Image: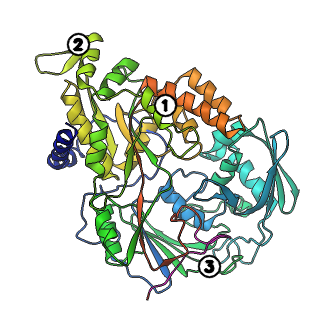
Amino acid sequence: MMKKRFSALLALLLASMMLLSACQGSPEAKDDGPAAPDGQDVQTDDKKTGGQPAGGEVVKDANELVIGTYMPVTTLVPWKTTSDGDGYILRQIYHTLVEMDQNSNFVPSMATEWECSEDGLTWTVKIRDDLYWQTGNGLFDEKVNVTAEDVKFSYDYYLDPANGSVRYTELSNTLKEVKVVDDYTVQFVTNDIDVLWEYKMYQNYIIPKKAVDENWDFENKPVGSGAYKFVEHVIDSQVVLERNDEYFKEPALDRIVYKIISDKSVSSIALQNQEIDIALSMLPTEVGNIANKDYLELRPSEIGSYRWIGFNCKNELFADPEVRKALSMAVDMDSAVEAIFKNDAGVTLAKRAYGPISYERPGGNEARFKEACVTYDPKKAEELLDSLGWAKGSDGIRAKDGKKLSFTLQVGNNDSNREKLAVIVSSQMKAIGVDCTAQTVEWGTHTDDIKNGNVQMYILGGYSNLDGPYRIMHTSDTMSPNCGYSNSEVDSLLDEAWRTIDIDERSELQTQAAEIFISEAPHIFCYFEYTQTGVSKAVQDFEQASVYRSLCNEFRNVGVNHK
């Protein structure tokens, strides 16, 4: 039976993707949105650009690393970004106090050491004494040390709501005061125990006070203390960085070029043609091609990234959790995941999600999530909708009190896997008398819609970092990617978790919160995606295959050996 369902879904995908593409320009009502990546007119992964990467032909210099990224730049203002695509670039230009390794351990960056007081309220942080603000940019003409005063200034700046930091709410809820102890020592005093304070040190970039005082253009001329300096940003085309010769160690690269190639299949071709050295995300249809090349290799992500279909819980169609459960039962997610991610190389690209926390993270518990989650049962879904008064009309579409169960499932145009999922879900909803229309919109429009609550149903992904459970499940008008979901018991469990130092106890609290969240079905829980990065074997010192971390630091110095 499973094989039969899988074959049917595969046929559906092949037959329906053109239909979905045709819907992209239709003026459907928009209804959702949170903060997340980009905001530019991104092509879908399935659209070709004449065999050339978007942004033009790539010509590499000898000591130049070329990275193909499918994510356009949203902003290069360091306190306004929530996008990984921006972070790839900003983490080479700026420092945060700490970095995170592949095992989610916090390691030195600008900070050399840090410790917390016994009461859990004061963090003392020592920073490097050999970091300087980048020169040759019109802001700094000569070397100027980065000091504890710069750290205090940066955090104080982010704590001022007038400055529009995207992390203002999190910082202001936690941070009471920042103190300078000496030139290279700073103290953070928190209002309460915050078990993720180190994570906040990992998130917030240190900026030069002089730039703010002089009303510097951070967007177009970012200046930090990192190993690579900004050269140019050509919108929808590329970002270029060059080595910072005044860095505390000699960077291995002369230049880094981020080529914005929104079509992942085109990025794969560019990698195979050796036009780029790294392609950040491989489509299931391309992993076999990469695996078969002796000069390339695949590198999987360490943490599964959550993907879900969200209901706007404030919409009258979805305010009742029982309706959300019925619609969730109509989707054969197991077969959908198999159909979307099956590949010739036999690589695991996704794993079924039964809840909102990655299984590799504290609180992620597959067995307990599965027990709380509804199972695929279209017959039971129809019975539940019948009992709730949603009866089929003469046209086969369900209605109640004169209102049809008709809505749009909105998806952004920068991920063909999610677009395929939208097609599958739309078809399976129709099978139980629900008029669900899949619609692709421009990515920036999509995220704005979710943020503003201008969606009915939507597909989104991410929020799989250490603070992801809090951001996804906790009531918030500013940081949550959900539309209208709120539960005081869930909030209470999460608040307690974020004050609990013992990791096992904290994990249990997060699991309990997730079980309640799952039982109320604000999401149709889809899958955890394991991104495969395509890497040229010419790239050196890249065992930790992430460009979201700095490429030149105390622990590594990524280079390239073009022979």
Three-letter code, disc 3: Pro
- SS state under label 3: loop
Above or below 414: residue 139: below
> Where is residue 173 drawn, in percent x and y?
70, 36
Q: Which quadrant of the structure image shows residue 223? A: bottom right
Q: Nearer the viewer, mark 3 or mark 1?
A: 1
Which residue lies at the image location 24% right of the left edge and 19% below the top edge? 382
What type is the residue that disc 2 sits on?
Gly
Crowd rating for badge 2 (residues with CA inside 10 Å; few <14, some 14–19, many 20+): few
Q: Which residue is mark 3?
A: 251
Q: How many marks?
A: 3
Labels 3 & 1 near each other (Cβ < 8 A): no
**CA separation in Å, label 2 and label 3:** 67 Å
Dividing the picture into quarters, in which one does residue 162 lie?
A: top right
- Residue at the spot of label 1: 368
Q: Amino acid at mark 1?
A: Arg
Earlier along the polypeptide chain: callout 3 or callout 1? 3
Please state if 451 lies on the left or on the right of 119 as rendered.
left
Q: What residue is shown at x 23% (from left), y 46% (from top)?
A: 25
Reading the image, the residue beneath label 2 is 402
Q: Residues within 10 Å of mark 1 (few under 14, many from 20)?
A: some
Task: Label 1, secondary structure: give it.
Answer: helix
SS majority, magenta: loop
Q: Quadrant of the C terminus?
A: bottom left
* 218 inside magenta stretch: no
Q: Position of residue 194 (x, y in %)?
A: 72, 39
Which residue reaches farthest left?
A: 394
Image location (x, y in percent) of residue 169: 64, 38
Boundaries of the magenta span: 551-562
